[in-house]
Image (cartoon, rainbow, N blue to C red):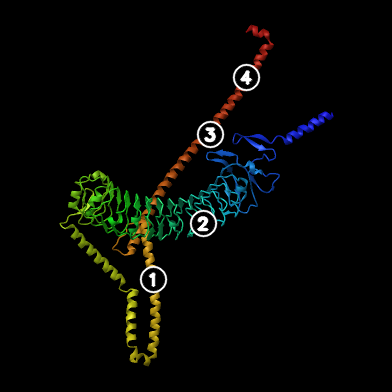
Amino acid sequence: MGWLHSVTLLSFFLVCSVVPAQREWDPTTRQWITTPSTVSKQDSNVQYSYRNLRWPVYKCREDIQNYDCVFHDVSIDRNAPGVYFGYENVMLNNQKRITFKNSTMRMLSETLVNSYGQIELLDLSDLQIEEIAPHAFTNGYNIQELYMGFNDIQKLPYNAFDNIQFLSKLVLDRNRLSSLPDGIFYNNPHLVALTINNNNLEEIGDNTFHNTKVLQNLELSSNKLTHIDLSIIPSLLYGNVSFNRLTKLAIPVEIEILDASYNQINNVTGSNNYNLTNLYLQHNNLTEITWLMHYPMLNLVDLSYNELEKITYRDFNKTVQLKELYLSNNRLVAFHFGNSRIPTLQILDVRHNHLLHVEKNQNQFDTLMQLYLDHNSIVTLKLGSNNTIQKLTLSNNDWDCSSLDVLFGSVHESIILDSDHNCKPDYQLKQNLCCKVSDKPYLDRLMQYIREASIAEKFQRADGRCSAADTLTSIQNLTDYVNQHAGSGLLQSNPQLQAEINQLQVDINQLTYQQTQLDQLLKSMHIEIDNYLRRYRVTKEGLVHPSENLHSVFDHLNSRRAFKEQETKQRQSEANRKKQERDTTEQENRTLQIELDAKKSKQEELKNVTRVINTNVKKLEARINRNPHASRIQ
């Protein structure tokens, strides 16, 4: 008996001390899970008995492509007291690529990274994170890629990334950040890619990237930036600062692709750069492009929707591989290349400008593959019979009919992509383009322009004949006259007149101040109208009052709204049709269900009848078996 007791105690000791782990089958993932004997084998969202029983615990048990740890259904409120991730023995939490599914984490605490100290990739996207604990990444020494986009983060701790020294990629898109702490990336010398698109950033200090010596990709699109100096990031290869409020742009020395579109840029600076190939500056306020000579390796330049008035070959004589040049929706009145040309240029877009005379650009036009000239005031165009143009737009110009005859002898109609429909008085439709017959086409257009300018000037004078400026001028002239006669003794003998003059001077000052304020307001409104014209791509008329252009914007928006309403009605009709089909199908399903229930009932009745018949048959067989004589008689 004593021997048996000793064996029992020894067996119990071996079970408790030698077996380090147990395996259990998880029917959800259809995998065997190894669970340490000293760690609870309960599922996620169940509390460990040896930890704070009020804190929930989450463990990852799924391994998918690109991730070796996926947390499911995590729910952490901002005011939650605490939470645990993984096993208490952090040596067992050796996953390196972590993400979340169907989860919410209002507050990012330090327990996640503390539990998984070997993380190299951490994806915290779309978790509705509002706040990051000051020490959330203290143990994130090995993190190389960190994704925190699509959250509600308003502020970053000043030392948020201090301990992530090997961080190479950081994504903070679609949050609500309005500023970055000073020197926030000072301890991230290996940072290569940073994206903070769609936030509320207003300004980024010049020392923000002081220590990021290898930063190559920077995306800050769709913020409210008024200042950022990209030239202080010499390692930058790709930059996107589009959809901001920048007025100045400093181009880095090594950048290859730069998108600064949809800003208010009127000044571009930078040293010589022999790497820049693609430059996007559409929708800005540029008035000159002499700075382009610093970037000879440009392949694509988009300067559409700016304030450019003149383009010459001198602006591009340094470029050696320019293929695409976009200049639409500017204020171009002159485009002169003369006998010079950019030999590599393939696409030229000068639509929606005020060009009149372009004949001297034939050498350049003949070597293009795509030429867009519509919506100008072009009268004549000359192209050689051996031109290489494959796509050409010509509509909405001021063509001379005889010039069109010559032009269509040099190009095939199949390459013309557009056409006119309604022509002005005295114009005729010729080969789908409006033109006018005239012996002296340019003189005729010049006289017409003078007439339009005179009419516009008369309207402007009529609008200003009772303006505040004229009133102020009259009052100022009266004041000057009074001051000239001040020494005549008239004012000394009439104190009341002196008081009235003083009051008049006060009124003049007030009116002058009001006039200044109104002028500034009017100027800002004109700028805003121009911005709306560019934003909605409405052609700006040069010889009309700005209110007319604003009416054009309203008309465009009304037509767009009407189109959207019509589209909505069509979709509503389609939805109603689908709903009707669904109702019909449901009604058919109900009818079929009723028929099915009736057949089931009939089937049940047949089964009952069958059971009764079988019972009777068995009774008859039993009677026969009990009466052998009867069976012999049969």
Q: Is 470 above or below relative to 441?
A: below
Within-10-Å neighbours for mark 2: few <14, some 14–19, many 20+ = many
Residue 425 seen in the figure: yes
Residue 190 placed where, x, y %?
A: 51, 50
Residue drawn at x 74%, y 33% is 14
In contact (CB < 8 Å): disc 1 and disc 4: no
Among the two numbered marks 3 and 1 on one chain, the one whose residue lies closer to the N terminus: 1
Q: Residues within 10 Å of mark 3 (few under 14, many from 20)?
A: few
- Kindly identify which residue carries mark 1: 518
Residue with the mark numbered 3: 593
Query: What kind of residue is marked 4?
Result: Asn
For the C terminus, give its image quadrant: top right
In percent of width and height, residue 352 lies at 30, 55
Mark 4 vs mark 2, CA separation in Å: 81 Å
- SS label for mark 2: loop
Left/right placement of residue 529 relative to residue 93 reads left
Quarter residue 222 falls in: bottom left
Q: Of the residues under marks 1 and 4, which one precedes in the sequence?
A: 1
Tell me the residue that label 2 is attached to: 177
C-alpha separation, residue under disc 2 versus residue under disc 3:
57 Å
- Residue annotated with mark 4: 614
The amino acid marked with disc number 3 is: Gln
Q: Left or right? Give the position of 159 relative to 412.
A: right
Closest to the observer, 549 or 148? 148
Q: Nearer the viewer, mark 3 or mark 1?
A: 1
Residue at image x 65%, y 34%?
Answer: 24
- State the separation of the CA atoms marked 1 and 2: 35 Å
Q: Amino acid at mark 1?
A: Leu
Which mark is in front, 1 or 2? 2
- Name the secondary structure under disc 4: helix
Q: Earlier in the sequence, mark 4 or mark 2?
A: 2
The reply to whether dot 1 and dot 2 touch (C-beta < 8 Å) is no
